[in-house]
Image (spheres, grey):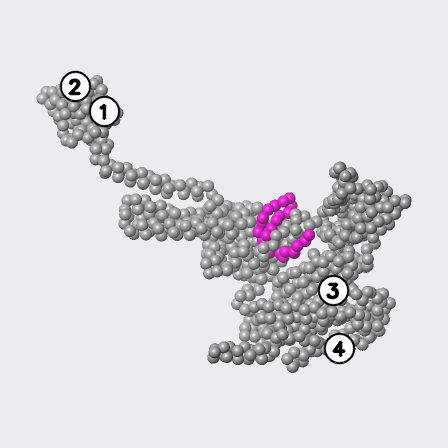
Amino acid sequence: MTRIYFVTILVALVALTMPAWAQVDIVATAQPRTVSVGEMLTYEITVTIRGTSALTTQAEPSLPDFDGFDTLTTSTRQGLSMGSGGTQSERTYSYTLRASKSGDFIFSPATVQVAGKTYRSAKVKVTVTPGAGSSPRSPFTPPGHEADVPPPIRDEGDYTPKQAIDLRLSAEPEKPYVDQQVVLTFGFYYQSESLYGDTRYEPPSAEDCVVKELPAPPNSSQIVGGREYLVQKRRWALFPTAAGELEIQPVRVITSLSPYGQSDERHTNSVRLQVRPLPQPPPDAHFEGAVGRFTAHLTSDRDAVKSGETFTLSLTIRGTGNVHSLGAPTPRVPDWVNIYKSREDRDVQVGYGGASDAVGGEARFDFLALAKQSGTLNIPPLDVVYFDPQRGRYDTASTDSVIIHIEPGIAVEEPPEQPDDQMRQIKLGRPDRVGSTPLFTANWFWWVQAIPLLLLLLSAYMSHRRSALLSDPVLARSLQAPRMAQQHLAEARAAIKRGDSSAFCASAAHGVTDFIAHKFGLQAADISTQEALAALRSQQVDDELVGRVQHLLEKCDRGRFAVGSPTEHNEMLAETVQVLRRLQTVRPRRG
Amino acid sequence: MCYLGIAVALLLTGWGWADTETGQLTQSTDEFAQANELYLAGDYQAAAQIYETMLAGGAHSAVVYYNLGNAYAQNGDLGAGMLNYRRALLLAPRDRDIIHNLANLESQVARQPSSWEAESWMRMVLVWLLSRLTINELAAITMSFYWLAVAMAIWRIRSRRRLVSVLLIASLLVFCISAGLSYAKWQRDYAGGQAIVLSDAEMYSGPGQHFEPLARLGAGTEVKLVQTQGRYIEIQTGAGGHGWVSGEQARLIFPFAQD
């Protein structure tokens, strides 16, 4: 029980101190900063709460006085994130304002109260010029998108079908700029009695452009020459990526002409676009390929950091146009701040800003920044230059400036994991001579690996053979027989050279008898002529060979007691060799 | 003892093969010196051209790749700089200058996490070993212990001593580990289709610009080549994304001679 009380008290203490841990940021922005009377702007207050209070605190900001402006719409959006850096909630209050009179207006700071503390945003200055102003737009347009929605694109609604089934492919505009949105409309006109079953389409194809399908308009009907035509339409948004002539291939349509499955394939006309290159951007403008109408916002994830700590600057470009491919300029920072592009997210939406044909969305570019010394970091407004194809000119969307307080940190120098910017110099010595081709890819490498295996096999075979000889003495003696005979023959040759007739005959006879004794496994090595002949007969050696052996051994016996000539001895030696060769071919019989 | 002597001789032979020069370093040192002088004079483009000529002639040297990487990096061509540093690192993985400058470049590009990045201590050890040994060093170690294992096996046939059995098992174990490491190195750095995006490139959902753009890849992004179709290549990014980019915008790290 004591432990439960202790834990309860600890949780209560933590809960009580939670608000004290909160870190609150409040940022107010207006976009655009300069409008004409009758035009609209978006005023946004973003309240970011970090720490444990982020989950529980709902802070409503107090608004400045919007004198000189009419409030058209309000909206709120909220995000909550939890990560290693802790919990963070972000709530954005958005107000669409319409300027009603000209002049310079300063919106006082928005304030928010969290845990008894009051947090203030910066003041926001807006300039309203007297100009003619644009016509008021629908108050139902989503906030933040007012400047982005291009004029409606002309529809191909006046086309008159010329046959019972007619197809039409058209594009608007026909002379777009590179990366300008083109709406491709496919119209399928048919009299209801002409078709049976479903119709299948294959979308258009073209090189050097990016294609996105647009929502299909509702089916409609049209009366031509007193006959009713049903009209189906499909639309695609095209973004040409290269200047020059762009041919869009015909759309293929497969229809059923009869209830029995007879089908028909038809093609629309092809469409040729003359894609114009973008004009030269103004000098000193950092154009990164944005074509359309955009607004830009620069924010920091922290307004106070310690030197040596990283923080993230986020540039968000919103609007209609080539959100899929536009680039971003890098925020300008002083030399003592390192900045790296770290992430890029794009959210491309069809029907952006309420116009069904408009393709737009937002691209967000994150930059990881690291301040190496303390001080106030003032990041000036960032200009995003874009080409407006409707106006045919370059415009600039500017962000607000961002101020970040850099406090002295634990490590003013670079953190150890950050590599220093100094590139190490080239190597001036002789190029090294290390082989660049992996040995595994060389044929010789694999052949060489066979050598140890062959050695291993040879060794195993020799070991096996030795074991076999050790376990079978008869076989071992049989294999030794030729060697023994060779020794006796060598002695016989030496005796011939010496002229020792007796020794020659003894050696020759021993050569034969020892060979027979070893070959056929007789117990005694020194056997008599009769024993040798008996052994041969027992082995069923043919009689002719037995006779030759007998003749040779008897001759040797006689020669021991009578001096013979060297010629006779050589003939006997030759006969002995022949007899031994014949005996060598005889296979011993076991048992 | 005779067999032990043979094993040691084979081991030494294996190491000797590791350092055998298989590349063709045929260019004169004068050419190298000339490129270095141009680099030091600030003419990085001209220096890069000479280094490229040397490499085209077969002089696949870590030093030349490193200097070429420097020349490209100084010229603002991050993708080509990264590619050449990575190639240099394949040949000299423990060279501190290459590691430093590569890390420097990587900090300037949106680096995708690699599927080879360490998650467990075993993987950390594996990655550490793979990133510090060349493929030929691993091949030499593998081959040496293979020969040693065979020598021990031959000795084991003649002698039943426990020491021989222990040595045989140990050498077989090291052989298996080094063979596995060699295979992993081969898969990671050579056969895995690792490529570097040379310049900022749009990644599409199919092989052509008319497909939906999925993301923009920054120069120097490391990707994995999956397949080629016409002018386009299918790639896999480190974050697991799939898409197609123009084949001219990405270059394989290995083989060196492709370009």
Chain identity of mark 1 = A
Check the image and name the residue furthest to the bottom.
A116
Magenta stretch: give its range. B212-236
Q: Is residue A412 left or right of residue B144?
A: right
Cα separation between marks 2 and 1: 15 Å
Report if residue A490 is visible in the image. Answer: no
Placement of the C terminus of chain A among the 4 image quadrants:
top left
The image's mark for residue A551 is 2
Measured Cα–Cα span from mark 4 to mark 3: 23 Å
Between B215 and A146, the one lying in front of the other is A146
Whether labels 4 and 3 share one chain: yes
Q: Are marks 4 and 1 on the same chain?
A: yes
Mark before the other along the chain sequence, 4 or 2: 4
Task: Measure the C-alpha gap from mark 1 to mark 3.
Answer: 110 Å
Verify CB contact (< 8 Å) between mark 2 and mark 3.
no
Name the chain under label 2: A
Identify the secondary structure beneath mark 4: loop
> Same chain for the residues at labels 4 and 2, yes or no?
yes
Location of residue A388 (image quadrant): bottom right
Chain identifier of the residue bearing label 3 in the image: A
Question: Disc 4 vs disc 2: Cβ atoms closer than 8 Å?
Answer: no
- Residue A530 position, x and y percent, is 13, 23
Q: Earlier in the sequence, mark 4 or mark 3?
A: 4
Q: Secondary structure at mark 3?
A: strand
Element under disc 2: helix
**Disc on the earlier residue, 1 or 3:** 3
